[in-house]
Amino acid sequence: MELITFYIFATISVVSSILVIGQRRPMTSVILLIVSFGGLSGLYVLLDAPFTAVTQIIIYAGAIMVLFLFVVMLLNAHTEDDSSGPLITPRGMKIGALLSAALAAEVVWALQQVGATTFPSEPGTAASISSVARIGSALFTTHAFAFEVTSILILVSLVGAVVIARKEH
Amino acid sequence: VVTLNHYLLLSGILFCIGTAGVFLRRNLITILLSIEIMLNAVNLTFVAGGRYLQTVDGQIITFFVMTVAAAEAAVGLALVIALFRHKETLNPDAFTLLKW
């Protein structure tokens, strides 16, 4: 049962990610990426990480992708310039596709060298890592410095985005 | 039964899809979307690793990666807007000012 659910979510995210790459219209790509994130958040639920699944939906699909949608609509650039030709033309791009395929083959080969590693399944382990209280207390004690640095990062990127996108006079 | 290898394999495949997008596409927005795919593939590895080691640190680093992704998307899209204003195109081959 768990295996079937895994394969359903994995297929959703892989197929929609491939379609993101294959689309000419950026708007469709963004919508398909949201579908892919939905599949990934299902996988997070399978991994006993409901907090991460919910933040995936709220932050990624809800905030970052809406930012992308705004920019796509603002630029009003519906398709790529050469919308009639094939998607992969120059030689450099073919080498790129080849390199990505080689990377995928390497990952598959390397994982086959390692034997199958099952997840620990003692009762109570799932509950301990899926607890939001655990995540919160670790975030604000052990990782408090990183958390504070993150707020500075957000502030810097906020100011930077405004300065970069501003119209010059 | 679903093993750790299933998740590692899935995230490896998703990462390769992301690199293929960066290599193949000539559209700045699609390239940024491919970077998001790669970041999500790595997030999946972190969460699966955290589940395997029975610690919440995997989910915490995923949280930080999401924050960095938000900052990256904001600055990257601001750059895309500024570039589009200059050249009226999203093709990265059009921006050759720094090319020797």
Image (cartoon, coloured by chain):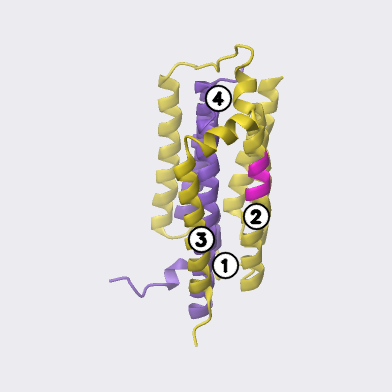
Chain colours: A yellow, B purple
Mark carried by residue B51: 4
Q: Mark 2 or mark 1: which is in front?
A: 2
Residue at (67% x, 31% y) in the render: A45
* Magenta stretch contains residue A84: no
Main secondary structure type of the part rendered in magenta: helix
Quick one: B42 or B94, which is closer to the camera? B42
Q: CA distance from mark 2 to mark 1?
A: 25 Å
Q: Nearer the viewer, mark 3 or mark 4?
A: 3
Q: Residues within 10 Å of mark 4 (few under 14, many from 20)?
A: many
Mark on residue A155? 3
Chain letter of disc 2 in the image: A
Q: Which residue is under mark 1? A: A80
Which residue is found at the position 33% from the left and 72% from the top?
B98
**CA separation in Å, label 3 and label 4:** 32 Å
Of all residues, the one furthest to the left in this rendering is B100
Q: Nearer the viewer, residue A132 or A72?
A: A132
Q: Nearer the viewer, mark 4 or mark 1?
A: 4
Q: Is residue B77 above or below residue A148?
A: below
Q: Which residues are magenta?
A: A54-59
Q: Does the image show residue B26?
A: no
Report which residue position mark 2 lands on. Answer: A63
Q: Are marks 2 and 3 on the same chain?
A: yes
Q: Earlier in the sequence, mark 2 or mark 3?
A: 2
Q: Dot 2, how many residues are within 10 Å of its Cα: few (below 14), some (14-19), or many (20+)?
A: some
